[in-house]
Image: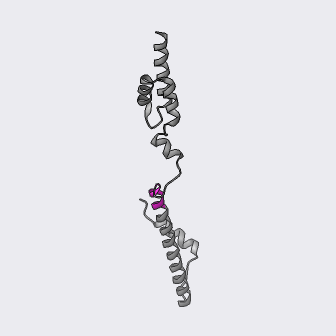
């Protein structure tokens, strides 16, 4: 009777230890009940980590962070657009100065644009 209780307790411990692995609690518990808690404990060493555990500690594969890569690409494109706009503004300011049109200082022009921009 004592062996039976120890067998079930050992199987439960193995199941608890394996709950975050690829097989899970029920798989390791059933395996330990059928074969032995010692065999179940040895199989814990062989079993791979869960998919969640693989995501946390895995080396990133190409395409694994596609959303982050897309976001980084979008940020780079926006930076290029801003630089082009700034270059166009500089050209327009130079043309205005050549024509004798008063040009506001860059900081005042930029603050004015920010104050009047719509808020989403």
> Where is residue 102 shown, x and y percent of the image?
55, 83
Residue 106 location, quadrant: bottom right
Residue, far bottom: 99
> Where is residue 103 shown, x and y percent of the image?
55, 81
Indicate yes or no whether the magenta region holds residue 107: no
Camera-side residue of 86 and 78: 78
> Where is residue 59 shown, x and y percent of the image?
53, 51
x 46%, y 9%: residue:
1
4 in relation to 93, above or below: above
Q: Main secondary structure of the magenta part?
A: helix
The magenta segment: 64-71
x 53%, y 83%: residue:
91
Q: Quarter of the image containing the C terminus?
A: bottom left
Residue 29 location, quadrant: top left
x 41%, y 26%: residue:
30
95 in relation to 67, above or below: below
> Where is residue 12 shown, x and y percent of the image?
47, 23
């Amino acid at each position: 009777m004592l062996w039976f209780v120890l067998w079930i307790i050992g199987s439960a411990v193995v199941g608890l230890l394996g709950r975050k692995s690829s097989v899970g609690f029920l798989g390791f518990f059933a395996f330990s009940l059928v074969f032995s808690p010692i065999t179940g404990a040895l199989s814990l060493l062989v079993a791979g980590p869960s998919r969640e555990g693989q995501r946390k500690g895995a080396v990133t594969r190409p395409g694994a962070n596609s959303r982050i890569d897309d976001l980084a690409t979008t940020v780079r494109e926006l930076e290029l657009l801003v630089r082009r706009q700034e270059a166009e503004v500089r050209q327009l300011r130079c043309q205005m100065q050549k024509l004798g049109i008063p040009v506001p200082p860059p900081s005042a022009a930029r603050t004015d644009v920010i104050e009047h921009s719509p808020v989403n």
